[in-house]
Image: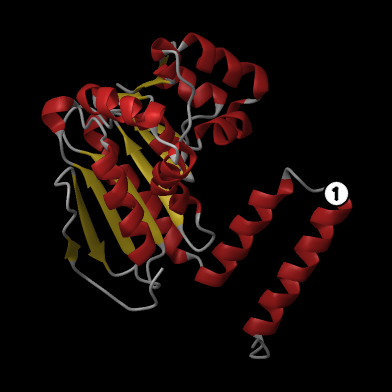
């Protein structure tokens, strides 16, 4: 990410999204409501570029969709072309890695990312929501990992986060059946941080954003790093990581940090 400060609106090449910068908050709005914000490789290229050029003073990124759906997944017309190209491409692995980068930047250690999810969040839409740290969802939400219906697998980084959130058995069941998960179940199994009436979604996201921004940035970054690494650590390793992080915070607060 860039270190510069910005308050502006970026212009994506695809026209499938709108990128707005307002101080420490960046908002990505999928804007194809006529097709339930279905995604295309061109959109993924724009998302990837936005992540690469995001100003360094941005602390929170909000992902949202216009209209009645967050995102219905990969555009059916784009899917035919994309899958055909990948089948014959010697660099298919590299191309898919590029698609994944459109989602992976949302896990950057210096960012807190929030998905504001209403209506359908299907396939790639579900994985886009999963790429975020938090999911604030409307009571009309319907999550589904629908790739199985095309004989495909989720390949945009969603499988790891899904297992982290709901556990292996539940994640496997959702991926191999493609069934839809409504708001109440999403809250129960850990997919949703909070569920609100549809008309309260924007306010709930604003409240969460404000709460995140109240915490000192460096402390938030340290906490996110600690929690992200916790699953792969023993207790001794995690305690050592906590000690190191705390010493950095104490040094910073006392004016002795680098």
Tally the numbered discs: 1
Residue 57 horizontal/vertical position (percent):
38, 73
Position above or below: 8 against 255: above
Residue 222 horizontal/vertical position (percent):
62, 64
- Which residue is drawn at the image coordinates 49% and 9% (left, top)? 177
Pick the residue in front: 114 or 124: 124
231 with respect to 104 (left or right): right
Q: Residue furthest left?
A: 34
Which image quarter: residue 256? Answer: bottom right
Which image quarter: residue 32? Answer: top left
- Which residue is drawn at the image coordinates 80% and 54% (left, top)? 238
Question: Does the rendering let one see residue 185?
Answer: yes
Question: Does the rendering let one see residue 216?
Answer: no
Q: Quadrant of the C terminus?
A: bottom right
Pick the residue in front: 226 or 95: 95
Position above or below: 105 against 179: below
Residue denoted by label 1: 235
């Amino acid at each position: 990410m860039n270190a510069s400060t910005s308050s502006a609106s970026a212009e994506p090449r695809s026209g499938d999204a709108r990128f707005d910068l307002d101080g420490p908050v960046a908002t990505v709005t999928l804007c194809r409501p006529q097709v339930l914000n279905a995604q295309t490789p061109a959109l993924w290229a724009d998302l990837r570029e936005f992540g690469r050029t995001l100003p360094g003073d941005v602390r929170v990124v909000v992902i949202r969709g216009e209209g009645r759906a967050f995102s219905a997944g990969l555009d059916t017309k784009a899917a035919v072309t994309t899958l055909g190209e990948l089948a014959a491409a010697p660099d298919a692995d590299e191309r898919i890695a590029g698609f994944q980068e459109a989602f992976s930047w949302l896990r950057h250690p210096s960012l807190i990312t929030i998905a504001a999810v209403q209506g359908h969040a299907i396939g790639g839409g579900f994985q886009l929501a999963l790429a975020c740290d938090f999911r604030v969802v409307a009571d009309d939400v319907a999550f589904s990992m629908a790739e199985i219906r095309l004989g495909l697998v989720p390949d945009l980084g969603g499988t790891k986060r899904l297992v982290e959130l709901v556990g292996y058995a539940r994640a496997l069941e959702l991926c191999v059946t493609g069934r839809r998960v409504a708001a109440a179940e999403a809250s129960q199994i850990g997919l949703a941080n909070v569920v609100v009436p549809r008309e309260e979604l924007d306010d709930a996201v604003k409240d969460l954003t404000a709460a995140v921004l109240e915490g000192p940035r460096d402390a938030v970054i340290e906490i996110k790093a600690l929690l992200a690494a916790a699953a792969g650590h023993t207790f001794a390793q995690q305690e050592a990581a906590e000690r190191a992080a705390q010493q950095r915070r104490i040094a910073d607060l006392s004016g002795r940090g680098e």
